Amino acid sequence: MRLERLNLNINGVDRFVTCDPETDTLAEVLRRMGLTGVKIGCNAGVCGACSIILDGEVVRACTKKMKRVAESSSITTIEGIGTPQHLHPLQQAWITYGGAQCGFCSPGFIVSAYGLLQQNQSPTREDVRQWFKRHHNICRCTGYKPLVDAVMAAAEVMRGDKTMADITYDFEGETEIYGSRHPRPTALAKVTGLADFGDDVELQLPAGVAHLAIVLAEAHHADIISIDTSEAEAMPGVMGVLTGKDVKGTNSLPMQGPIQRQRGTGIRQFPVIADKKVCRRGDVVAVVAADTRQHAREAAKKVKQNLDVLPTYMTFPEAVMPTAVEIHPGIPNWYMEQPVFKGEDTAEIFEDAPFTAEGSFYTQHEPHLTIEPDTLQGYWGTDGMMTLQCKSHDFGETRDALSVACGIDRENIRMTLNASGAAFGYTVCPNTFALVVTAVQNLDMPCTFTLSYDEFKHVTGKRMATFSNGRIACDEEGMITAAEYDVALDHGAYGFVPIFLNLTSLGFHGYNIPNFKALGRGGSSNHNFNTSYRGFGSPQISTTTESLIDMAAEKAGIDPWEFRYKNAARPGDLTINQRPYLDYPYPKLLEMAKPTYDAYKAEAEARRAAGRHTGVGMSMGGFVVTIGMFDSAEVALELNPDGTITHYNTWEDLGQGGDIGTLTHTVKALEPLGIKPSQVKLVMNDSKTCPDTGLAAASRSHYVAGLATIHAAGQLMDAMRKEDGSYRTHAEMVAAGIPTKYVGHHDQFNMGLDPGLDPNTGQGNRVPAFMYGLNLALVEVDVTTGKTNVLRFTWVGDVGVVGNMLSVEGQGYGGLSHSIGFALSENYDAQDKHGTMIGCGIPQIDAIPDDMNLIFLETPRPLGPHGSSGCSEVFQSCNHMAVINAINNACGVRVFALPATPDKVKAGWEAKQRGEDLTPPKYFLGSDFEEELEWIKVNPV
Ligand code: FES
Ligand code: FES
């Protein structure tokens, strides 16, 4: 290796830089110098996380080889733009306007915006959007709108039109934290580049750490004859090559489940390191440990796989054909089912119905597409505990799973969070954690693991695909009389099944369907395995039901808004699972949305008159809060000697806002003490020091952590309260021998909830709260290319009393941006191109409308903390269907198989011009729908 010494001016200071000009990138060199505000996400010039300013130009430093950086160049990184003590207006605006959720993209965006404002201090919103598009700045959390808001606000300060105080949250003037726009406490570190994400932590570790790289299966489905590691072991720097035999436990991650109607035992094998079979492309067959990441990756290429390739079934319909072999021998590929029956048998109703509509629908495997790839560290701590620094949604079940799969005492696993570049659900499955634990156990040394973006995409789970056939009937007045659907969940190679019951309970959410039957099926293919993703199950089944609603309205000649208003559930109406809705806000939400709907329609008509294909679409639906009967959470509050309060919990915060949620709940619950936000200390996300608050999923965290906080606060205040009603100080508590720390608990076991759905009827009351939403989209379709442009989007919904408006809006804009991506572009099919963000169809800023609006109806939830519900997943439930229905309204093309990519829309348009029927054939899902339901009726479990 030959090195070079360069003199560079970095953040205003002349510094010498020593580098390998041939292999080092500017991003790597700056990070080695400690400037870790330069983030590496894609490492391929796609995402802009590594943006810096080089000689006045915004540059993606990951693509800039050092040999192309000239002597005496001037470089500005986020660290040179502002500091915590002296924030730049952009950094302040990012905090105030909710620009930093996970914060991984924030430094790159701020640096990029700084470049813009150096050139133009009076940009329009469109100028800002085009700038971010041109400089490849991608954010997965915020939906972009808050970022443009922030740039516009900072520009005002830079022009002198406003002061820094004008764009800074007024902490002193805050009279009520609940419902406020109080910024999240972690934002300061994120906008200054000082938040330490996993890859940054790696740079801070002492010498003597093993770097890990993985070897992925070379086939989607194969028996493993042998894995030859000998050549890899001889490569430079290699410390060890691990295969399945090196996994200390069962070498199988426990599956979540089972459900009651299951053929055979259900799948029980999810290998940490595959040693007998590979069932998907992302199966890991070996792990290489070496002294550097580069050495580990080079050695991983030398591992040889001797595989006996088997037939491959990449879809559920292929996997359930009679000739298909069992992917997991002894377990049918279709092995789960759940029926739902409500009211009279639907067959006769359909025969006599004046209007019916039917169709077959496909929803794709959706990739989470965080900008940060998966990254974590593991080591034996000084306390003897296996310590993981990671990003995780679920400390508790991860420890359970690692204990079994890796043969380690659960109580000896310590989980902690690094600053985390979002996850949206994928870390519920701890498959990468198990690799690190195995490496630490075998090597007896600290290990660090950062996946390349390509590895990350193929190794981690995805939202699962569904295939469905459905139909709906209504009377002359447009009142729905019956509906049916048969839906199959394709969970890929391995299944995490809690999503399954959402398919048979969230369809037609918010409607009164008097007579209904459905069958949910689930099973295996050789696709990637399914894991959690925001809104799990709802986007899939809403594709079926919100298509059918619009198709029925069209058949009956009734406006889609009117059709929904007629059929919206009102008090006394029951869900498809024959339970009352917990609230009945849909008619009200429809009324609130009507002015916007009418305005969108008028605009669409005006554009159509000008020869454009513009349309309006809507969708309606809701989502569950908490995981139901078996949900519980604990937090702890402690009174400190100086009168401040410490809150301990494991509300895993990957950018959702666990920090501000915890702070808000604490201040609110301790209102009688007059505690201010500045008097609350957060100790979060360390399983050794914090009680188990449960997983950060199912829109449960704000709800259950809030209730547990109220419980803890009540105990603490009872203990502090004197007879005269005043409160003891810490010193007085200690003097009186009264404990100063209290654990608050929330448990849903005895609330009267059902554990799931009745396996014979589908009846069930599973959760204590729902969220409700209505979506309106205005789109334009270029029928010559098939490209759909979403012009405007409005969500009207009810998540109860809003706890922190800034973070709820953040979840809203972010969720809607994922929904638009799900509708139009996102897909993962385990192909080479799906190893990149662009290949997976991540929405860039020009794909997301700047005109996005959120309108809240705040119906207090009687059981929720301070009247709140959850929020996150209502923004990624049925929302995408407003876009799909709008495409149909714009050009008459109904897209039955998502995403609605330009090729599909164009083909549909052309087929329509030829007068062809666009309705796809029914899917074969393993058996006849009617016969299967009849069989279930006479074979109860
Ligand atoms: S563009 Fe450099 S990390 Fe993505
Ligand atoms: S805040 Fe932009 S990627 Fe998370």
Image (cartoon, grey):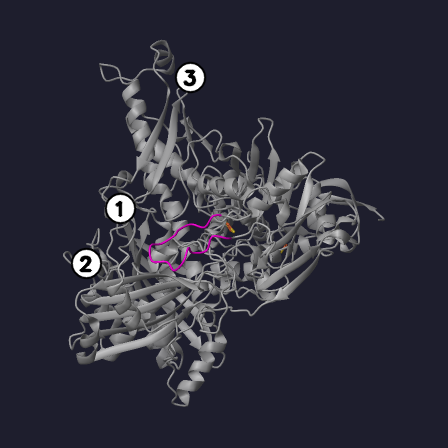
Span colored in magenta: 254-269
The residue pinned by badge 2 equals: 574
| Residue most extreme to the bottom | 914
Q: Mark 3, mark 2: which one is toward the viewer?
A: 2
Category of crowding for the residue at label 1, using alpha-carbon neighbours closer than 10 angstroms: few (below 14), some (14–19), many (at least 20): many
Q: Is residue 109 visible?
A: yes
The disc, 3 or 1, on the residue closer to the chain's N-terminal end is: 3
Q: Quadrant of residue 836?
A: bottom right
Taking the spot 56% from the left edge, 70% from the top edge, the residue there is 311
Calculate the distance from the C-alpha at mark 3 to the C-alpha at mark 1.
38 Å
The answer to whether 21 appears left or right of 917 in the picture is right
Q: Residues within 10 Å of mark 3 (few under 14, many from 20)?
A: some
Counting residues from the N terminus, which is met first, the one under dot 1 or under dot 2?
Answer: 2
Q: Secondary structure at mark 1?
A: loop
Kind of residue at disc 1: Pro
Instruction: Give the number of the disc on residue 768.
Output: 1
Toward the viewer: 182 or 938?
Answer: 938
The answer as to whether callout 3 falls within 8 Å of ligand 2 is no
Q: Which quarter of the picture shows residue 310?
A: bottom right
